[in-house]
Image (cartoon, helix red, strand yellow):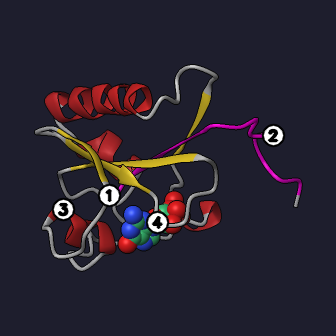
Amino acid sequence: MSAYDNNNIFAKILLGEIPCKKIYESDFALAFHDIHPQAPIHALVIPKGKFVDFADFSKRATEAEAAGFTKAVGIVAETVGAHHQGYRLISNCGANAHQEVPHYHVHILAGRPLGPMLNKA
Ligand code: 5GP
């Protein structure tokens, strides 16, 4: 895993340098709509701390950060109405998972049947 890149796009969103369609904010997390939604509901939840990916977060987050972030994901899923018919959480971690933005984030996808978990490709 590489070092945290302070210039990644989510770092800039956290600093308010790039706008986002905000859904929710707490001391530990910020949630906003994905710019290229893959489903009728596609939210992103990011921790406020500087974590590259899930592996980094699971190692270095304090208990308060881990709990606060987990609670935020649940709150956001309810806020966007994803919990009624079910939803999928995805967190791409590293190269094989095609993680594009190197700031830990969870995708919340919902609003239609989402099909099988993975493409066979
Ligand atoms: P990853 O592949 O890292 O798991 O997902 C990154 C996600 O961030 C993609 O779904 C992409 O559409 C989204 N994204 C990239 N740049 C921006 C941006 O500037 N604003 C928002 N709201 N989403 C972005």
Residue type, numbered disc 3? Leu
- Report which residue position mark 4 lands on: 35
Q: For the residues labelled 2 and 1, say whether their Cβ atoms are less than 8 Å apart.
A: no
Q: Residue at x 78, y 47 (%)?
A: 118
Q: Earlier in the sequence, mark 4 or mark 1?
A: 1
Q: Earlier in the sequence, mark 4 or mark 2?
A: 4
Mark in the foreground, 2 or 1: 1
Mark in the foreground, 3 or 4: 4
Foreground residue among 112 and 52: 112
Residue type, numbered disc 1? Lys
Residue 25: x, y in percent?
19, 42
Foreground residue among 117 and 82: 82
- Report which residue position mark 1 lands on: 21
Look at the numbered disc 1 and say if its residue's Cβ is closer than 8 Å to ligand 1: yes
Say the numbered circle drawn on residue 14.
Answer: 3
Q: Residues within 10 Å of mark 2 (few under 14, many from 20)?
A: few
Residue type, numbered disc 2? Gly
Residue type, numbered disc 4? Ile
> What is the spatial separation of the Cα atoms under label 4 and label 2, in whole angstroms?
22 Å
